[in-house]
Amino acid sequence: MTELLLGAYGAAMGGSARGIGRGRSGADGRFEYLGLVAEVESPSWVTVTPRRVFAALEADSAIAAWERAEDGSLHELAMHDSGASASPCHLAVAARPSGGEALVAARYGDGVVAVHGVGASGGDGLGPAEQELDAIGSGPWPAQASPHAHHVLVLDDGRIATADLGADRVHLHRWRGARLERVASVALPAGTAPRDLLPLSGGNLAVLGEWGLTVSLLRPTQETFEFAGSASLPGERGLSQAAALALSADGRFVIAGVRGANRIAVTRWDGAELTAVGDIDCGGDWPRHLVRDRDFVHVANQRSDSVTSFALDSAGALTPLGEPVFAPSPTCLAVLS
């Protein structure tokens, strides 16, 4: 059995959820919604560690932290305002070489990548922003008028990669003591709008293009990465938006959601290039996020208040598992460790 937490939109973001939800899937991969676990407005992204849960509160432009109890309940530790126009949308926890951990936040509204202290360096679970890294740039789509930091990925060597949806860039950072330093930026084709990052074998990265409707490959070089081509996703550009990435258990298939077209697409990774395999209806409306759970994939369908589940076979084919399951305005699925 797998336990999961659900981020969701509340009334302030046009949704129906009251906070962070809880769910589980059994041996057959079928999802069950268990109800509310923490009441808070629009926790659109949830990041889980063995001791804590962190959430990006998009509507309130804040970040919050909870302690995980043995009975599965959450006890709020701290909440910090990110600024009126910040709109944090993604979080990742990283170890600092100087000691302790940091929560690195991608802020969509102002394009900033912010660093917060965690634990001993963050007071009671989470500290206010200690560092804010600005960005510049834009792209051809209306949604790219300014920088929009959207995803944070901690690489195996400790570097931090961030996706800037507005500037068509992936930024790379290294720790210098307790602070992050931006050391490189990788340009993507204009209009890609990089939303999510996913590590692949061989130190490669997959990049989801929200408006470009692509899964792009970034190949590692000595110090940074280089763009090495893209596989296309289903949907019509300008009407559909790619939304999330997950990797199969064997590392051979990249799964992506596409909102608007309402498809779940599978792309093959052979260690050298990405190739589109096929796609299937998501079983709901607006597949905002998805997560792999063993050999199953769960999809958060934001606008239809549902989670749909699929079995993924060794050839990369997806098979629906039963009917959609009710979950209020889900925007994120996080597997509990």
Image (cartoon, rainbow, N blue to C red):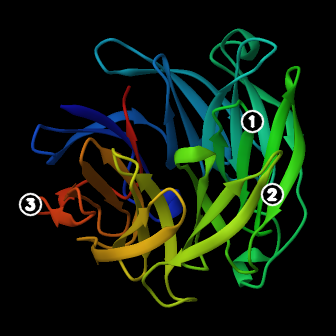
Helix, strand or loop status at disc 3: loop
Image quadrant assignment for residue 306 = bottom left
Badge 1 amino acid? Arg
Task: Indicate left or right for 84 with 180 as reference.
Answer: left
Q: Quadrant of the C terminus?
A: top left
Mark number displayed over residue 237: none
Q: Quadrant of the N terminus?
A: top left
- How far across and how far down the image is residue 302, in percent? 38, 64
The residue sitting at 49% across, 66% down in the picture is 243
Badge 2 amino acid? Asp
Helix, strand or loop status at disc 1: loop
- Mark 2 — residue? 110
Badge 3 amino acid? Gly
Rounded to the nearest angstrom, the CA distance separating label 3 from label 1 is 41 Å
Q: Which callout, 3 or 1, points at the residue further toward the start of the chain? A: 1
Q: Which callout, 2 or 3, points at the residue further toward the start of the chain? A: 2
Q: Are marks 2 and 1 in contact (CB under 8 Å)?
A: no
Is residue 41 at least partly visible in the picture? Answer: no
- Mark 1 — residue? 159
- Mark 3 — residue? 322
Helix, strand or loop status at disc 2: loop
